Amino acid sequence: MAGSEPRVHYLAGFSCPLGGLTSGKPRVLCHEEEVFLSTGSEFVYVYDQEGGLLTAVYQFPDQVWHLQLLALRRALYVLCARRGIYCLSLEPRRRWSSSQTSEDNKDSEASSPVITVDPEACVLPDTTLCAFTVHDDVLVALVQGPAQWKMQLFERPRPGEDCQPGGLVGEVELSTSTPPAGPPGKATVPCFLPVLCCVSPPGSKVPLGHPQGCGGFMLEKALFGLLFGADATLLESPVILCGLPDGQLCCVVLKALVTSQSAPGDPKALVKILHHLEEPVVFMGALKTEPQAEAAVESVLSCEDVYSDCLVALGHHGRTLAIKASWDKSGNLVPELREYCLPGPVLCAACSGGSRMYHSTPSDLCVVDLALGGIPLNSEQPQPDGVPGGLPPLLCPASLSICSVLTLSVLPNTPAGDTELLALSTKGCLMTCRLELSSEMPGPTRMTTENTGQKIKELLSGIGDVSERVSFLKKAVDQRNKALTSLNEAMNLQDVLMATCLLENHSDFSLDQGWTLCIQVLTSSSALDLDSAGSAVTYTIPVDRLGPGSQREVTLPLGPSESGVLDLPVTVSCTLFYSLKEVVGGALTPSDPLEDPFLEEQPLDLLPEQEGICLPLSRQTVDMLQCLRFPSLAPLCARTPCPLGPAADLVDTFLETCRAPSSEVAGPAALRAKYLPPSTASIRVSTELLRAALEDTHSGVPLCSATLQWLLAENAAVDIVRAQALSSVQGVAPDGTDVHLIVREVAVTDLCLAGPIQAVEIQVESSSLADMCRAHHAIVRRMQTMVMEQAARGSSPPDLRVQYLRQIHANHEALLREVQTLRDRLCTEDEAGSCATAQRLLQVYKQLRSPSLVLL
């Protein structure tokens, strides 16, 4: 901003607590040459700018939260935390000589005597008071109750006078209050204090003292009436404006509040909610957004006042509200509300009485201008944003290169075109900042139709530059991620079960934008915990372009999971999905959104996120029989460690090398293999059923070997099993546990009336109960498929002994009841008793896993 370099002059330094001052509590006021200052501690300082020295230092019993000065009455009202409101008479005092420059003495108050405030100066004692404002002969206070904010109106107390209970002339509840968190029974300091100010109608007398000191301002008649209604206009009553920490902006008509105790009706009807900022309100003020033409200014009599035509409110995080009276397209006068977003968090703010507003953040002090370029309302020239006399479309603050200002005040009586600010920094430095602001302040805050296009071009150019930087940074991040992935794989090498999915286009068309390959990996519940639920992971791979005859290969992990356990079986489902929202949205989006802005209103969001065409491709289940590895079947020269075996533990390796040759291994697996028999499960299938199912693919092969080949048909070792005509095989599960498959022919007696039934028994043995259950589940799944296929052919089973089947069924029901009893007993017995119960439970499970039935 040209011509806006501030000239900063440091006046004095004040002591601040460790860690610096905090926002929200310090205050600084100025009247003529006197500065009234509070740093948020228990002290209030009176500083003389002309002499460069302190005239008084007042000490209060607790933190000072707010100051308000009635200059003509020489009275200073002070809100002391958890005490109430004090009133001090500012009679002329003897001045103490001290050097006030920050270079000579930073703690300037150290050489001035401290005046302890008399407890009788507390004119309104109340521990719940959080804010107040004084207007003429009344004092408005805001107290925080356990559930509601309450506004109270008192006769203005004078210095040396007690405010008796009879002084309360009005009271109304505002909105829900959230008490500050803290220990029960102990008051805590709130993070944000409410903000109160008095808005006067045009034509009323000027409040006592300087407007900045009394916390009030005047609004023009049109805006005053639109905001506060006919009651405030007809009564010519001031209005108390309140900004709450929860973001509510509400108002109460002062004269209506005076008569609220005697008038009938609901007192809450006196409260009007203007807006909700959804963040703590930290400042409220008024601005002039329509500068008068030079001729008009010359015609204004010296006794007339030019009132503010815009009400502004700032939130802690930078959300800004501006309200102004403007003409709509039908020629009606309506309130125009606009929300802006300024840099935050906002520590403090101040208005200059013109069109400029200053606000401070931890990193900068900024100024914004709400004037519209000096175009009067009755002018026929086009107004920005298409609304005559409307608010600017956006605000871009200009930096003043001053940081960490905690409280701010605009000094009056500065030369024309200049502005002087009085500020207190987080380090406790009191300073003045003189700004020589030119009359023409560039930027979008004074935007016209001519520079709007140029500004938009600059913004788009900046967006292009940012886009290039983002693209470059994204590429660099991708390269770094690939390098880190490779390094991570090298440093943490472990075996993972991988699945490869091949997508091949056999059609005459290409798959282009909008197509996505979705692969869902669904794990079953744990074999040992029947109550556990499975989990699903879906991988989405965009199909950019897949021409006819082209194929794409996708490799993805199946396990183990984060717990280190491979949950089998795993179901892999492949689906092609065509997103209508992506394609339709891309087709309706214009190449230049500035050319067709109305397309932003098209109801594209009505399309569901998953609206599209779904084409199921395949569904494959991976179970234990497919994951078994058979290192003993490979040639000696090609035998390698199990690719899915667990990584060797370093401690076990060290103990293994230290073990003597004749000593025995004492690991958990060895102890389990030595002292516990392997877990076993079996299933029997009639020879007739197996021959009928395998005659087409395994004719001329011994039935036991053909059965084993059929079970391992999807395993990589099936060729070796077929070449060696094996009927039993020793395999290794993914976790390194041995799994033994045995297929043999047996005769089942006592089942058929015609005599014994020839059957094939498939037995699974493993030292791991979980792996045995997973292998048994895989065998049962294949048998179910085979039985359903044979049943469709219409084969009939032989005549069976029904009494024998009933006996087997009764025995199984007894075993199941015993299982439930044993499981209930395990929950109540001690360690010694539960050991015997667990052994019996394993025996019952073994009997259940080896039934005397056969698949026919």
Image (cartoon, rainbow, N blue to C red):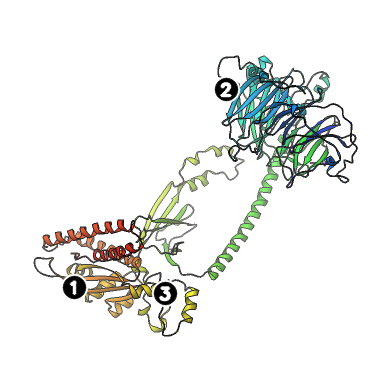
Q: Quadrant of residue 365?
A: top right
On screen, 547 above or below 30?
Answer: below
On screen, 345 above or below 666?
Answer: above
**As drawn, is 644 to the left or to the right of 783?**
right
**As drawn, is 758 to the left or to the right of 493?**
left
The amino acid type of the residue labelled 1 equals Val
Q: Are marks 1 and 2 in contact (CB under 8 Å)?
A: no
Rendering coords of residue 563 (x, y %)? 45, 62
Cα–Cα span, label 1 and label 2: 92 Å
- Quadrant position of the N terminus in the picture: top right
At numbered mark 3, what does the secondary structure look like: helix, strand or loop?
A: loop
Q: Which of pointers 1 and 2 lies earlier in the amino acid sequence? A: 2
Q: Which of pointers 3 and 2 lies earlier in the amino acid sequence? A: 2
Q: State which mark lies toward you, 3 or 1.
A: 3
On screen, 425 above or below 248?
Answer: below
Q: Residues within 10 Å of mark 3 (few under 14, many from 20)?
A: few
Cα–Cα span, label 3 and label 1: 37 Å
Q: Name the disc covering residue 746, or none.
A: 1
Provide the residue designation for mark 2. Answer: 268
Q: Name the disc covering residue 667, or none.
A: 3
Q: State which mark lies toward you, 3 or 2.
A: 3
Front-lying residue, 141 or 540 = 141
Q: State which mark lies toward you, 1 or 2.
A: 2
Q: Quadrant of residue 645?
A: bottom left
The amino acid type of the residue labelled 3 equals Gly
- Quadrant position of the C terminus in the picture: bottom left
Cα–Cα span, label 3 and label 2: 78 Å
**As drawn, is 540 to the left or to the right of 70?**
left
